[in-house]
Image (spheres, rainbow, N blue to C red):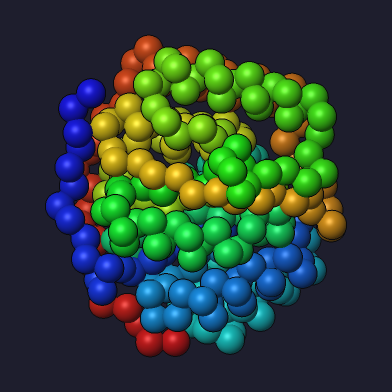
Amino acid sequence: MARLNLPPLAPADYRISVVLPVFAETDSVREVANWLREKLGARMLETIIVLSPKSGPASRAVCDELCAADPRFRIHVQQVNPGLGNAVKEGYALTRGNLVLNMDSDGEMENETVSRMLEAMEAHGYEMVVASRWMKGGGFSGYDRKKYLLNWGFQQLFRILYLTRVNDLTYGFKLMRGELARGIAWDGTLHEIACETTMKPIKLGAKVGAVPSKWTARVQGQSKNTFWRTFRYVGMALKIWARGATLESAPAANAAPRQP
Ligand SMILES: Nc1nc2c(ncn2[C@@H]2O[C@H](COP(=O)(O)OP(=O)(O)O)[C@@H](O)[C@H]2O)c(=O)[nH]1
Ligand SMILES: [Mg+2]
C-alpha cells in the first residue's frame, strides 16, 4: 500500500483541536474537559463540544460553564440528527488544529491514554494514533459480553483484510492529523463512524500507531450504541475495504494557539 506521507509535524508545533460529542452527560463532561485542559495546556488550541439538540438543560449548563471558564471551549449544536457520526463529522469540519483528538464525554475512555498518544506521535511521527483496548495494558471493564465477543471477531477478520497491525479498529478514541480529519469524506451517521475514522486513514496508507487503553463502563446515563447497531460497523468496514478512501485537499491547519 502506498504511503500517505503528510508533511512532518514537529512536536513543538502541535495544536490540538478536541472534538467532544455530548448527548445527555453532565459530570463526566466536566471531568474529561478539565483533565484535557490541564494536561494539554497550551497545546490545546480549542475544544469543540458537539451538543445534540436533544441534550437536556443539565448537559447544556455544564457545557456553558466550561465555555465561560475557558474561551478555547465552544459549543456547536449538531445540525444533522440524530447520530454520533453526524456529530463527529460536523465537529471535524470545524476544527482548525493540526491535530484532532476524538474523545467521548461519558467517562468511558481513559484520560491518561491521551498522554500516551502524544508520546507515540512524538516518538514515531505517526499521522494517527488510536487507543487500543486489545493491546497488553489495555482492556475492558463492564463491557457487554455479546458485544465483547463480536468485537473480538471483528478485529480478527478486519485486521487481516486491512493488512494492519492495529488491533482495535472499532474504537472512536484517537488522535489524528488535521489534514485527515478535515480532508476525508466521512459517511457514517451513527456509531459506525468509530471504525470509519480508523479504517479510512489505514486504507489511505497513513502511518498509524496504537497505544494501550482501558475502557470502563460509564457510571451515569446510557449508551446509545445498541447491540444491533454493532452490525453497522461490519457494513462500513466492508464498504471501505471494497471502495478505499480518498483525501481531498484539506484547508491547511492554521492559527497560532489562543491563550487560555
Ligand atoms: N452530539 C451527540 N453526541 C452523541 C450522540 N450519540 C452519542 N453521543 C456521544 O458520544 C459518546 C459515545 O456515545 P455512546 O452512546 O456512549 O456510545 P458507546 O460508548 O459506543 O456505547 C458519548 O459521549 C455520547 O454523549 C449524538 O447523537 N449526538
Ligand atoms: Mg459510551
Residue 58: quadrant of the picture: bottom right
Residue 112: quadrant of the picture: bottom right
Residue 54 in percent (x, y) is at 72, 52
Q: Is residue 143 left or right of residue 81?
A: right
Residue 13 in percent (x, y) is at 25, 71
Q: Residue at x 84, y 57 (%)?
A: 219
Question: Is the N terminus in the top left, top right, bottom left or bottom right quadrant?
Answer: top left
Q: Is residue 80 visible?
A: no
Look at the picture and state if 200 lies above or below 181. above
Q: Is residue 100 left or right of residue 192?
A: left
Residue 30: quadrant of the picture: bottom right
Look at the picture and state if 69 lies above or below 30. below
Q: Nearer the viewer, residue 38 or 240?
A: 38
Residue 72 in percent (x, y) is at 46, 77
Q: Residue at x 32, y 21 (%)?
A: 244
Look at the picture and state if 243 lies above or below 97. above
How many circles with numbers are drawn on the protein? Answer: 0
Q: Nearer the viewer, residue 196 or 155?
A: 155
Q: Residue at x 21, y 66 (%)?
A: 10
Residue 212 in percent (x, y) is at 55, 49
Residue reaching furthest front? 136
Residue reaching furthest top? 242
Q: Nearer the viewer, residue 77 or 209?
A: 209
Q: Residue at x 26, y 32 (%)?
A: 205
Question: Is the C terminus in the top left, top right, bottom left or bottom right quadrant?
Answer: bottom left
Q: Is residue 225 visible?
A: yes
Q: Is residue 123 left or right of residue 155?
A: left
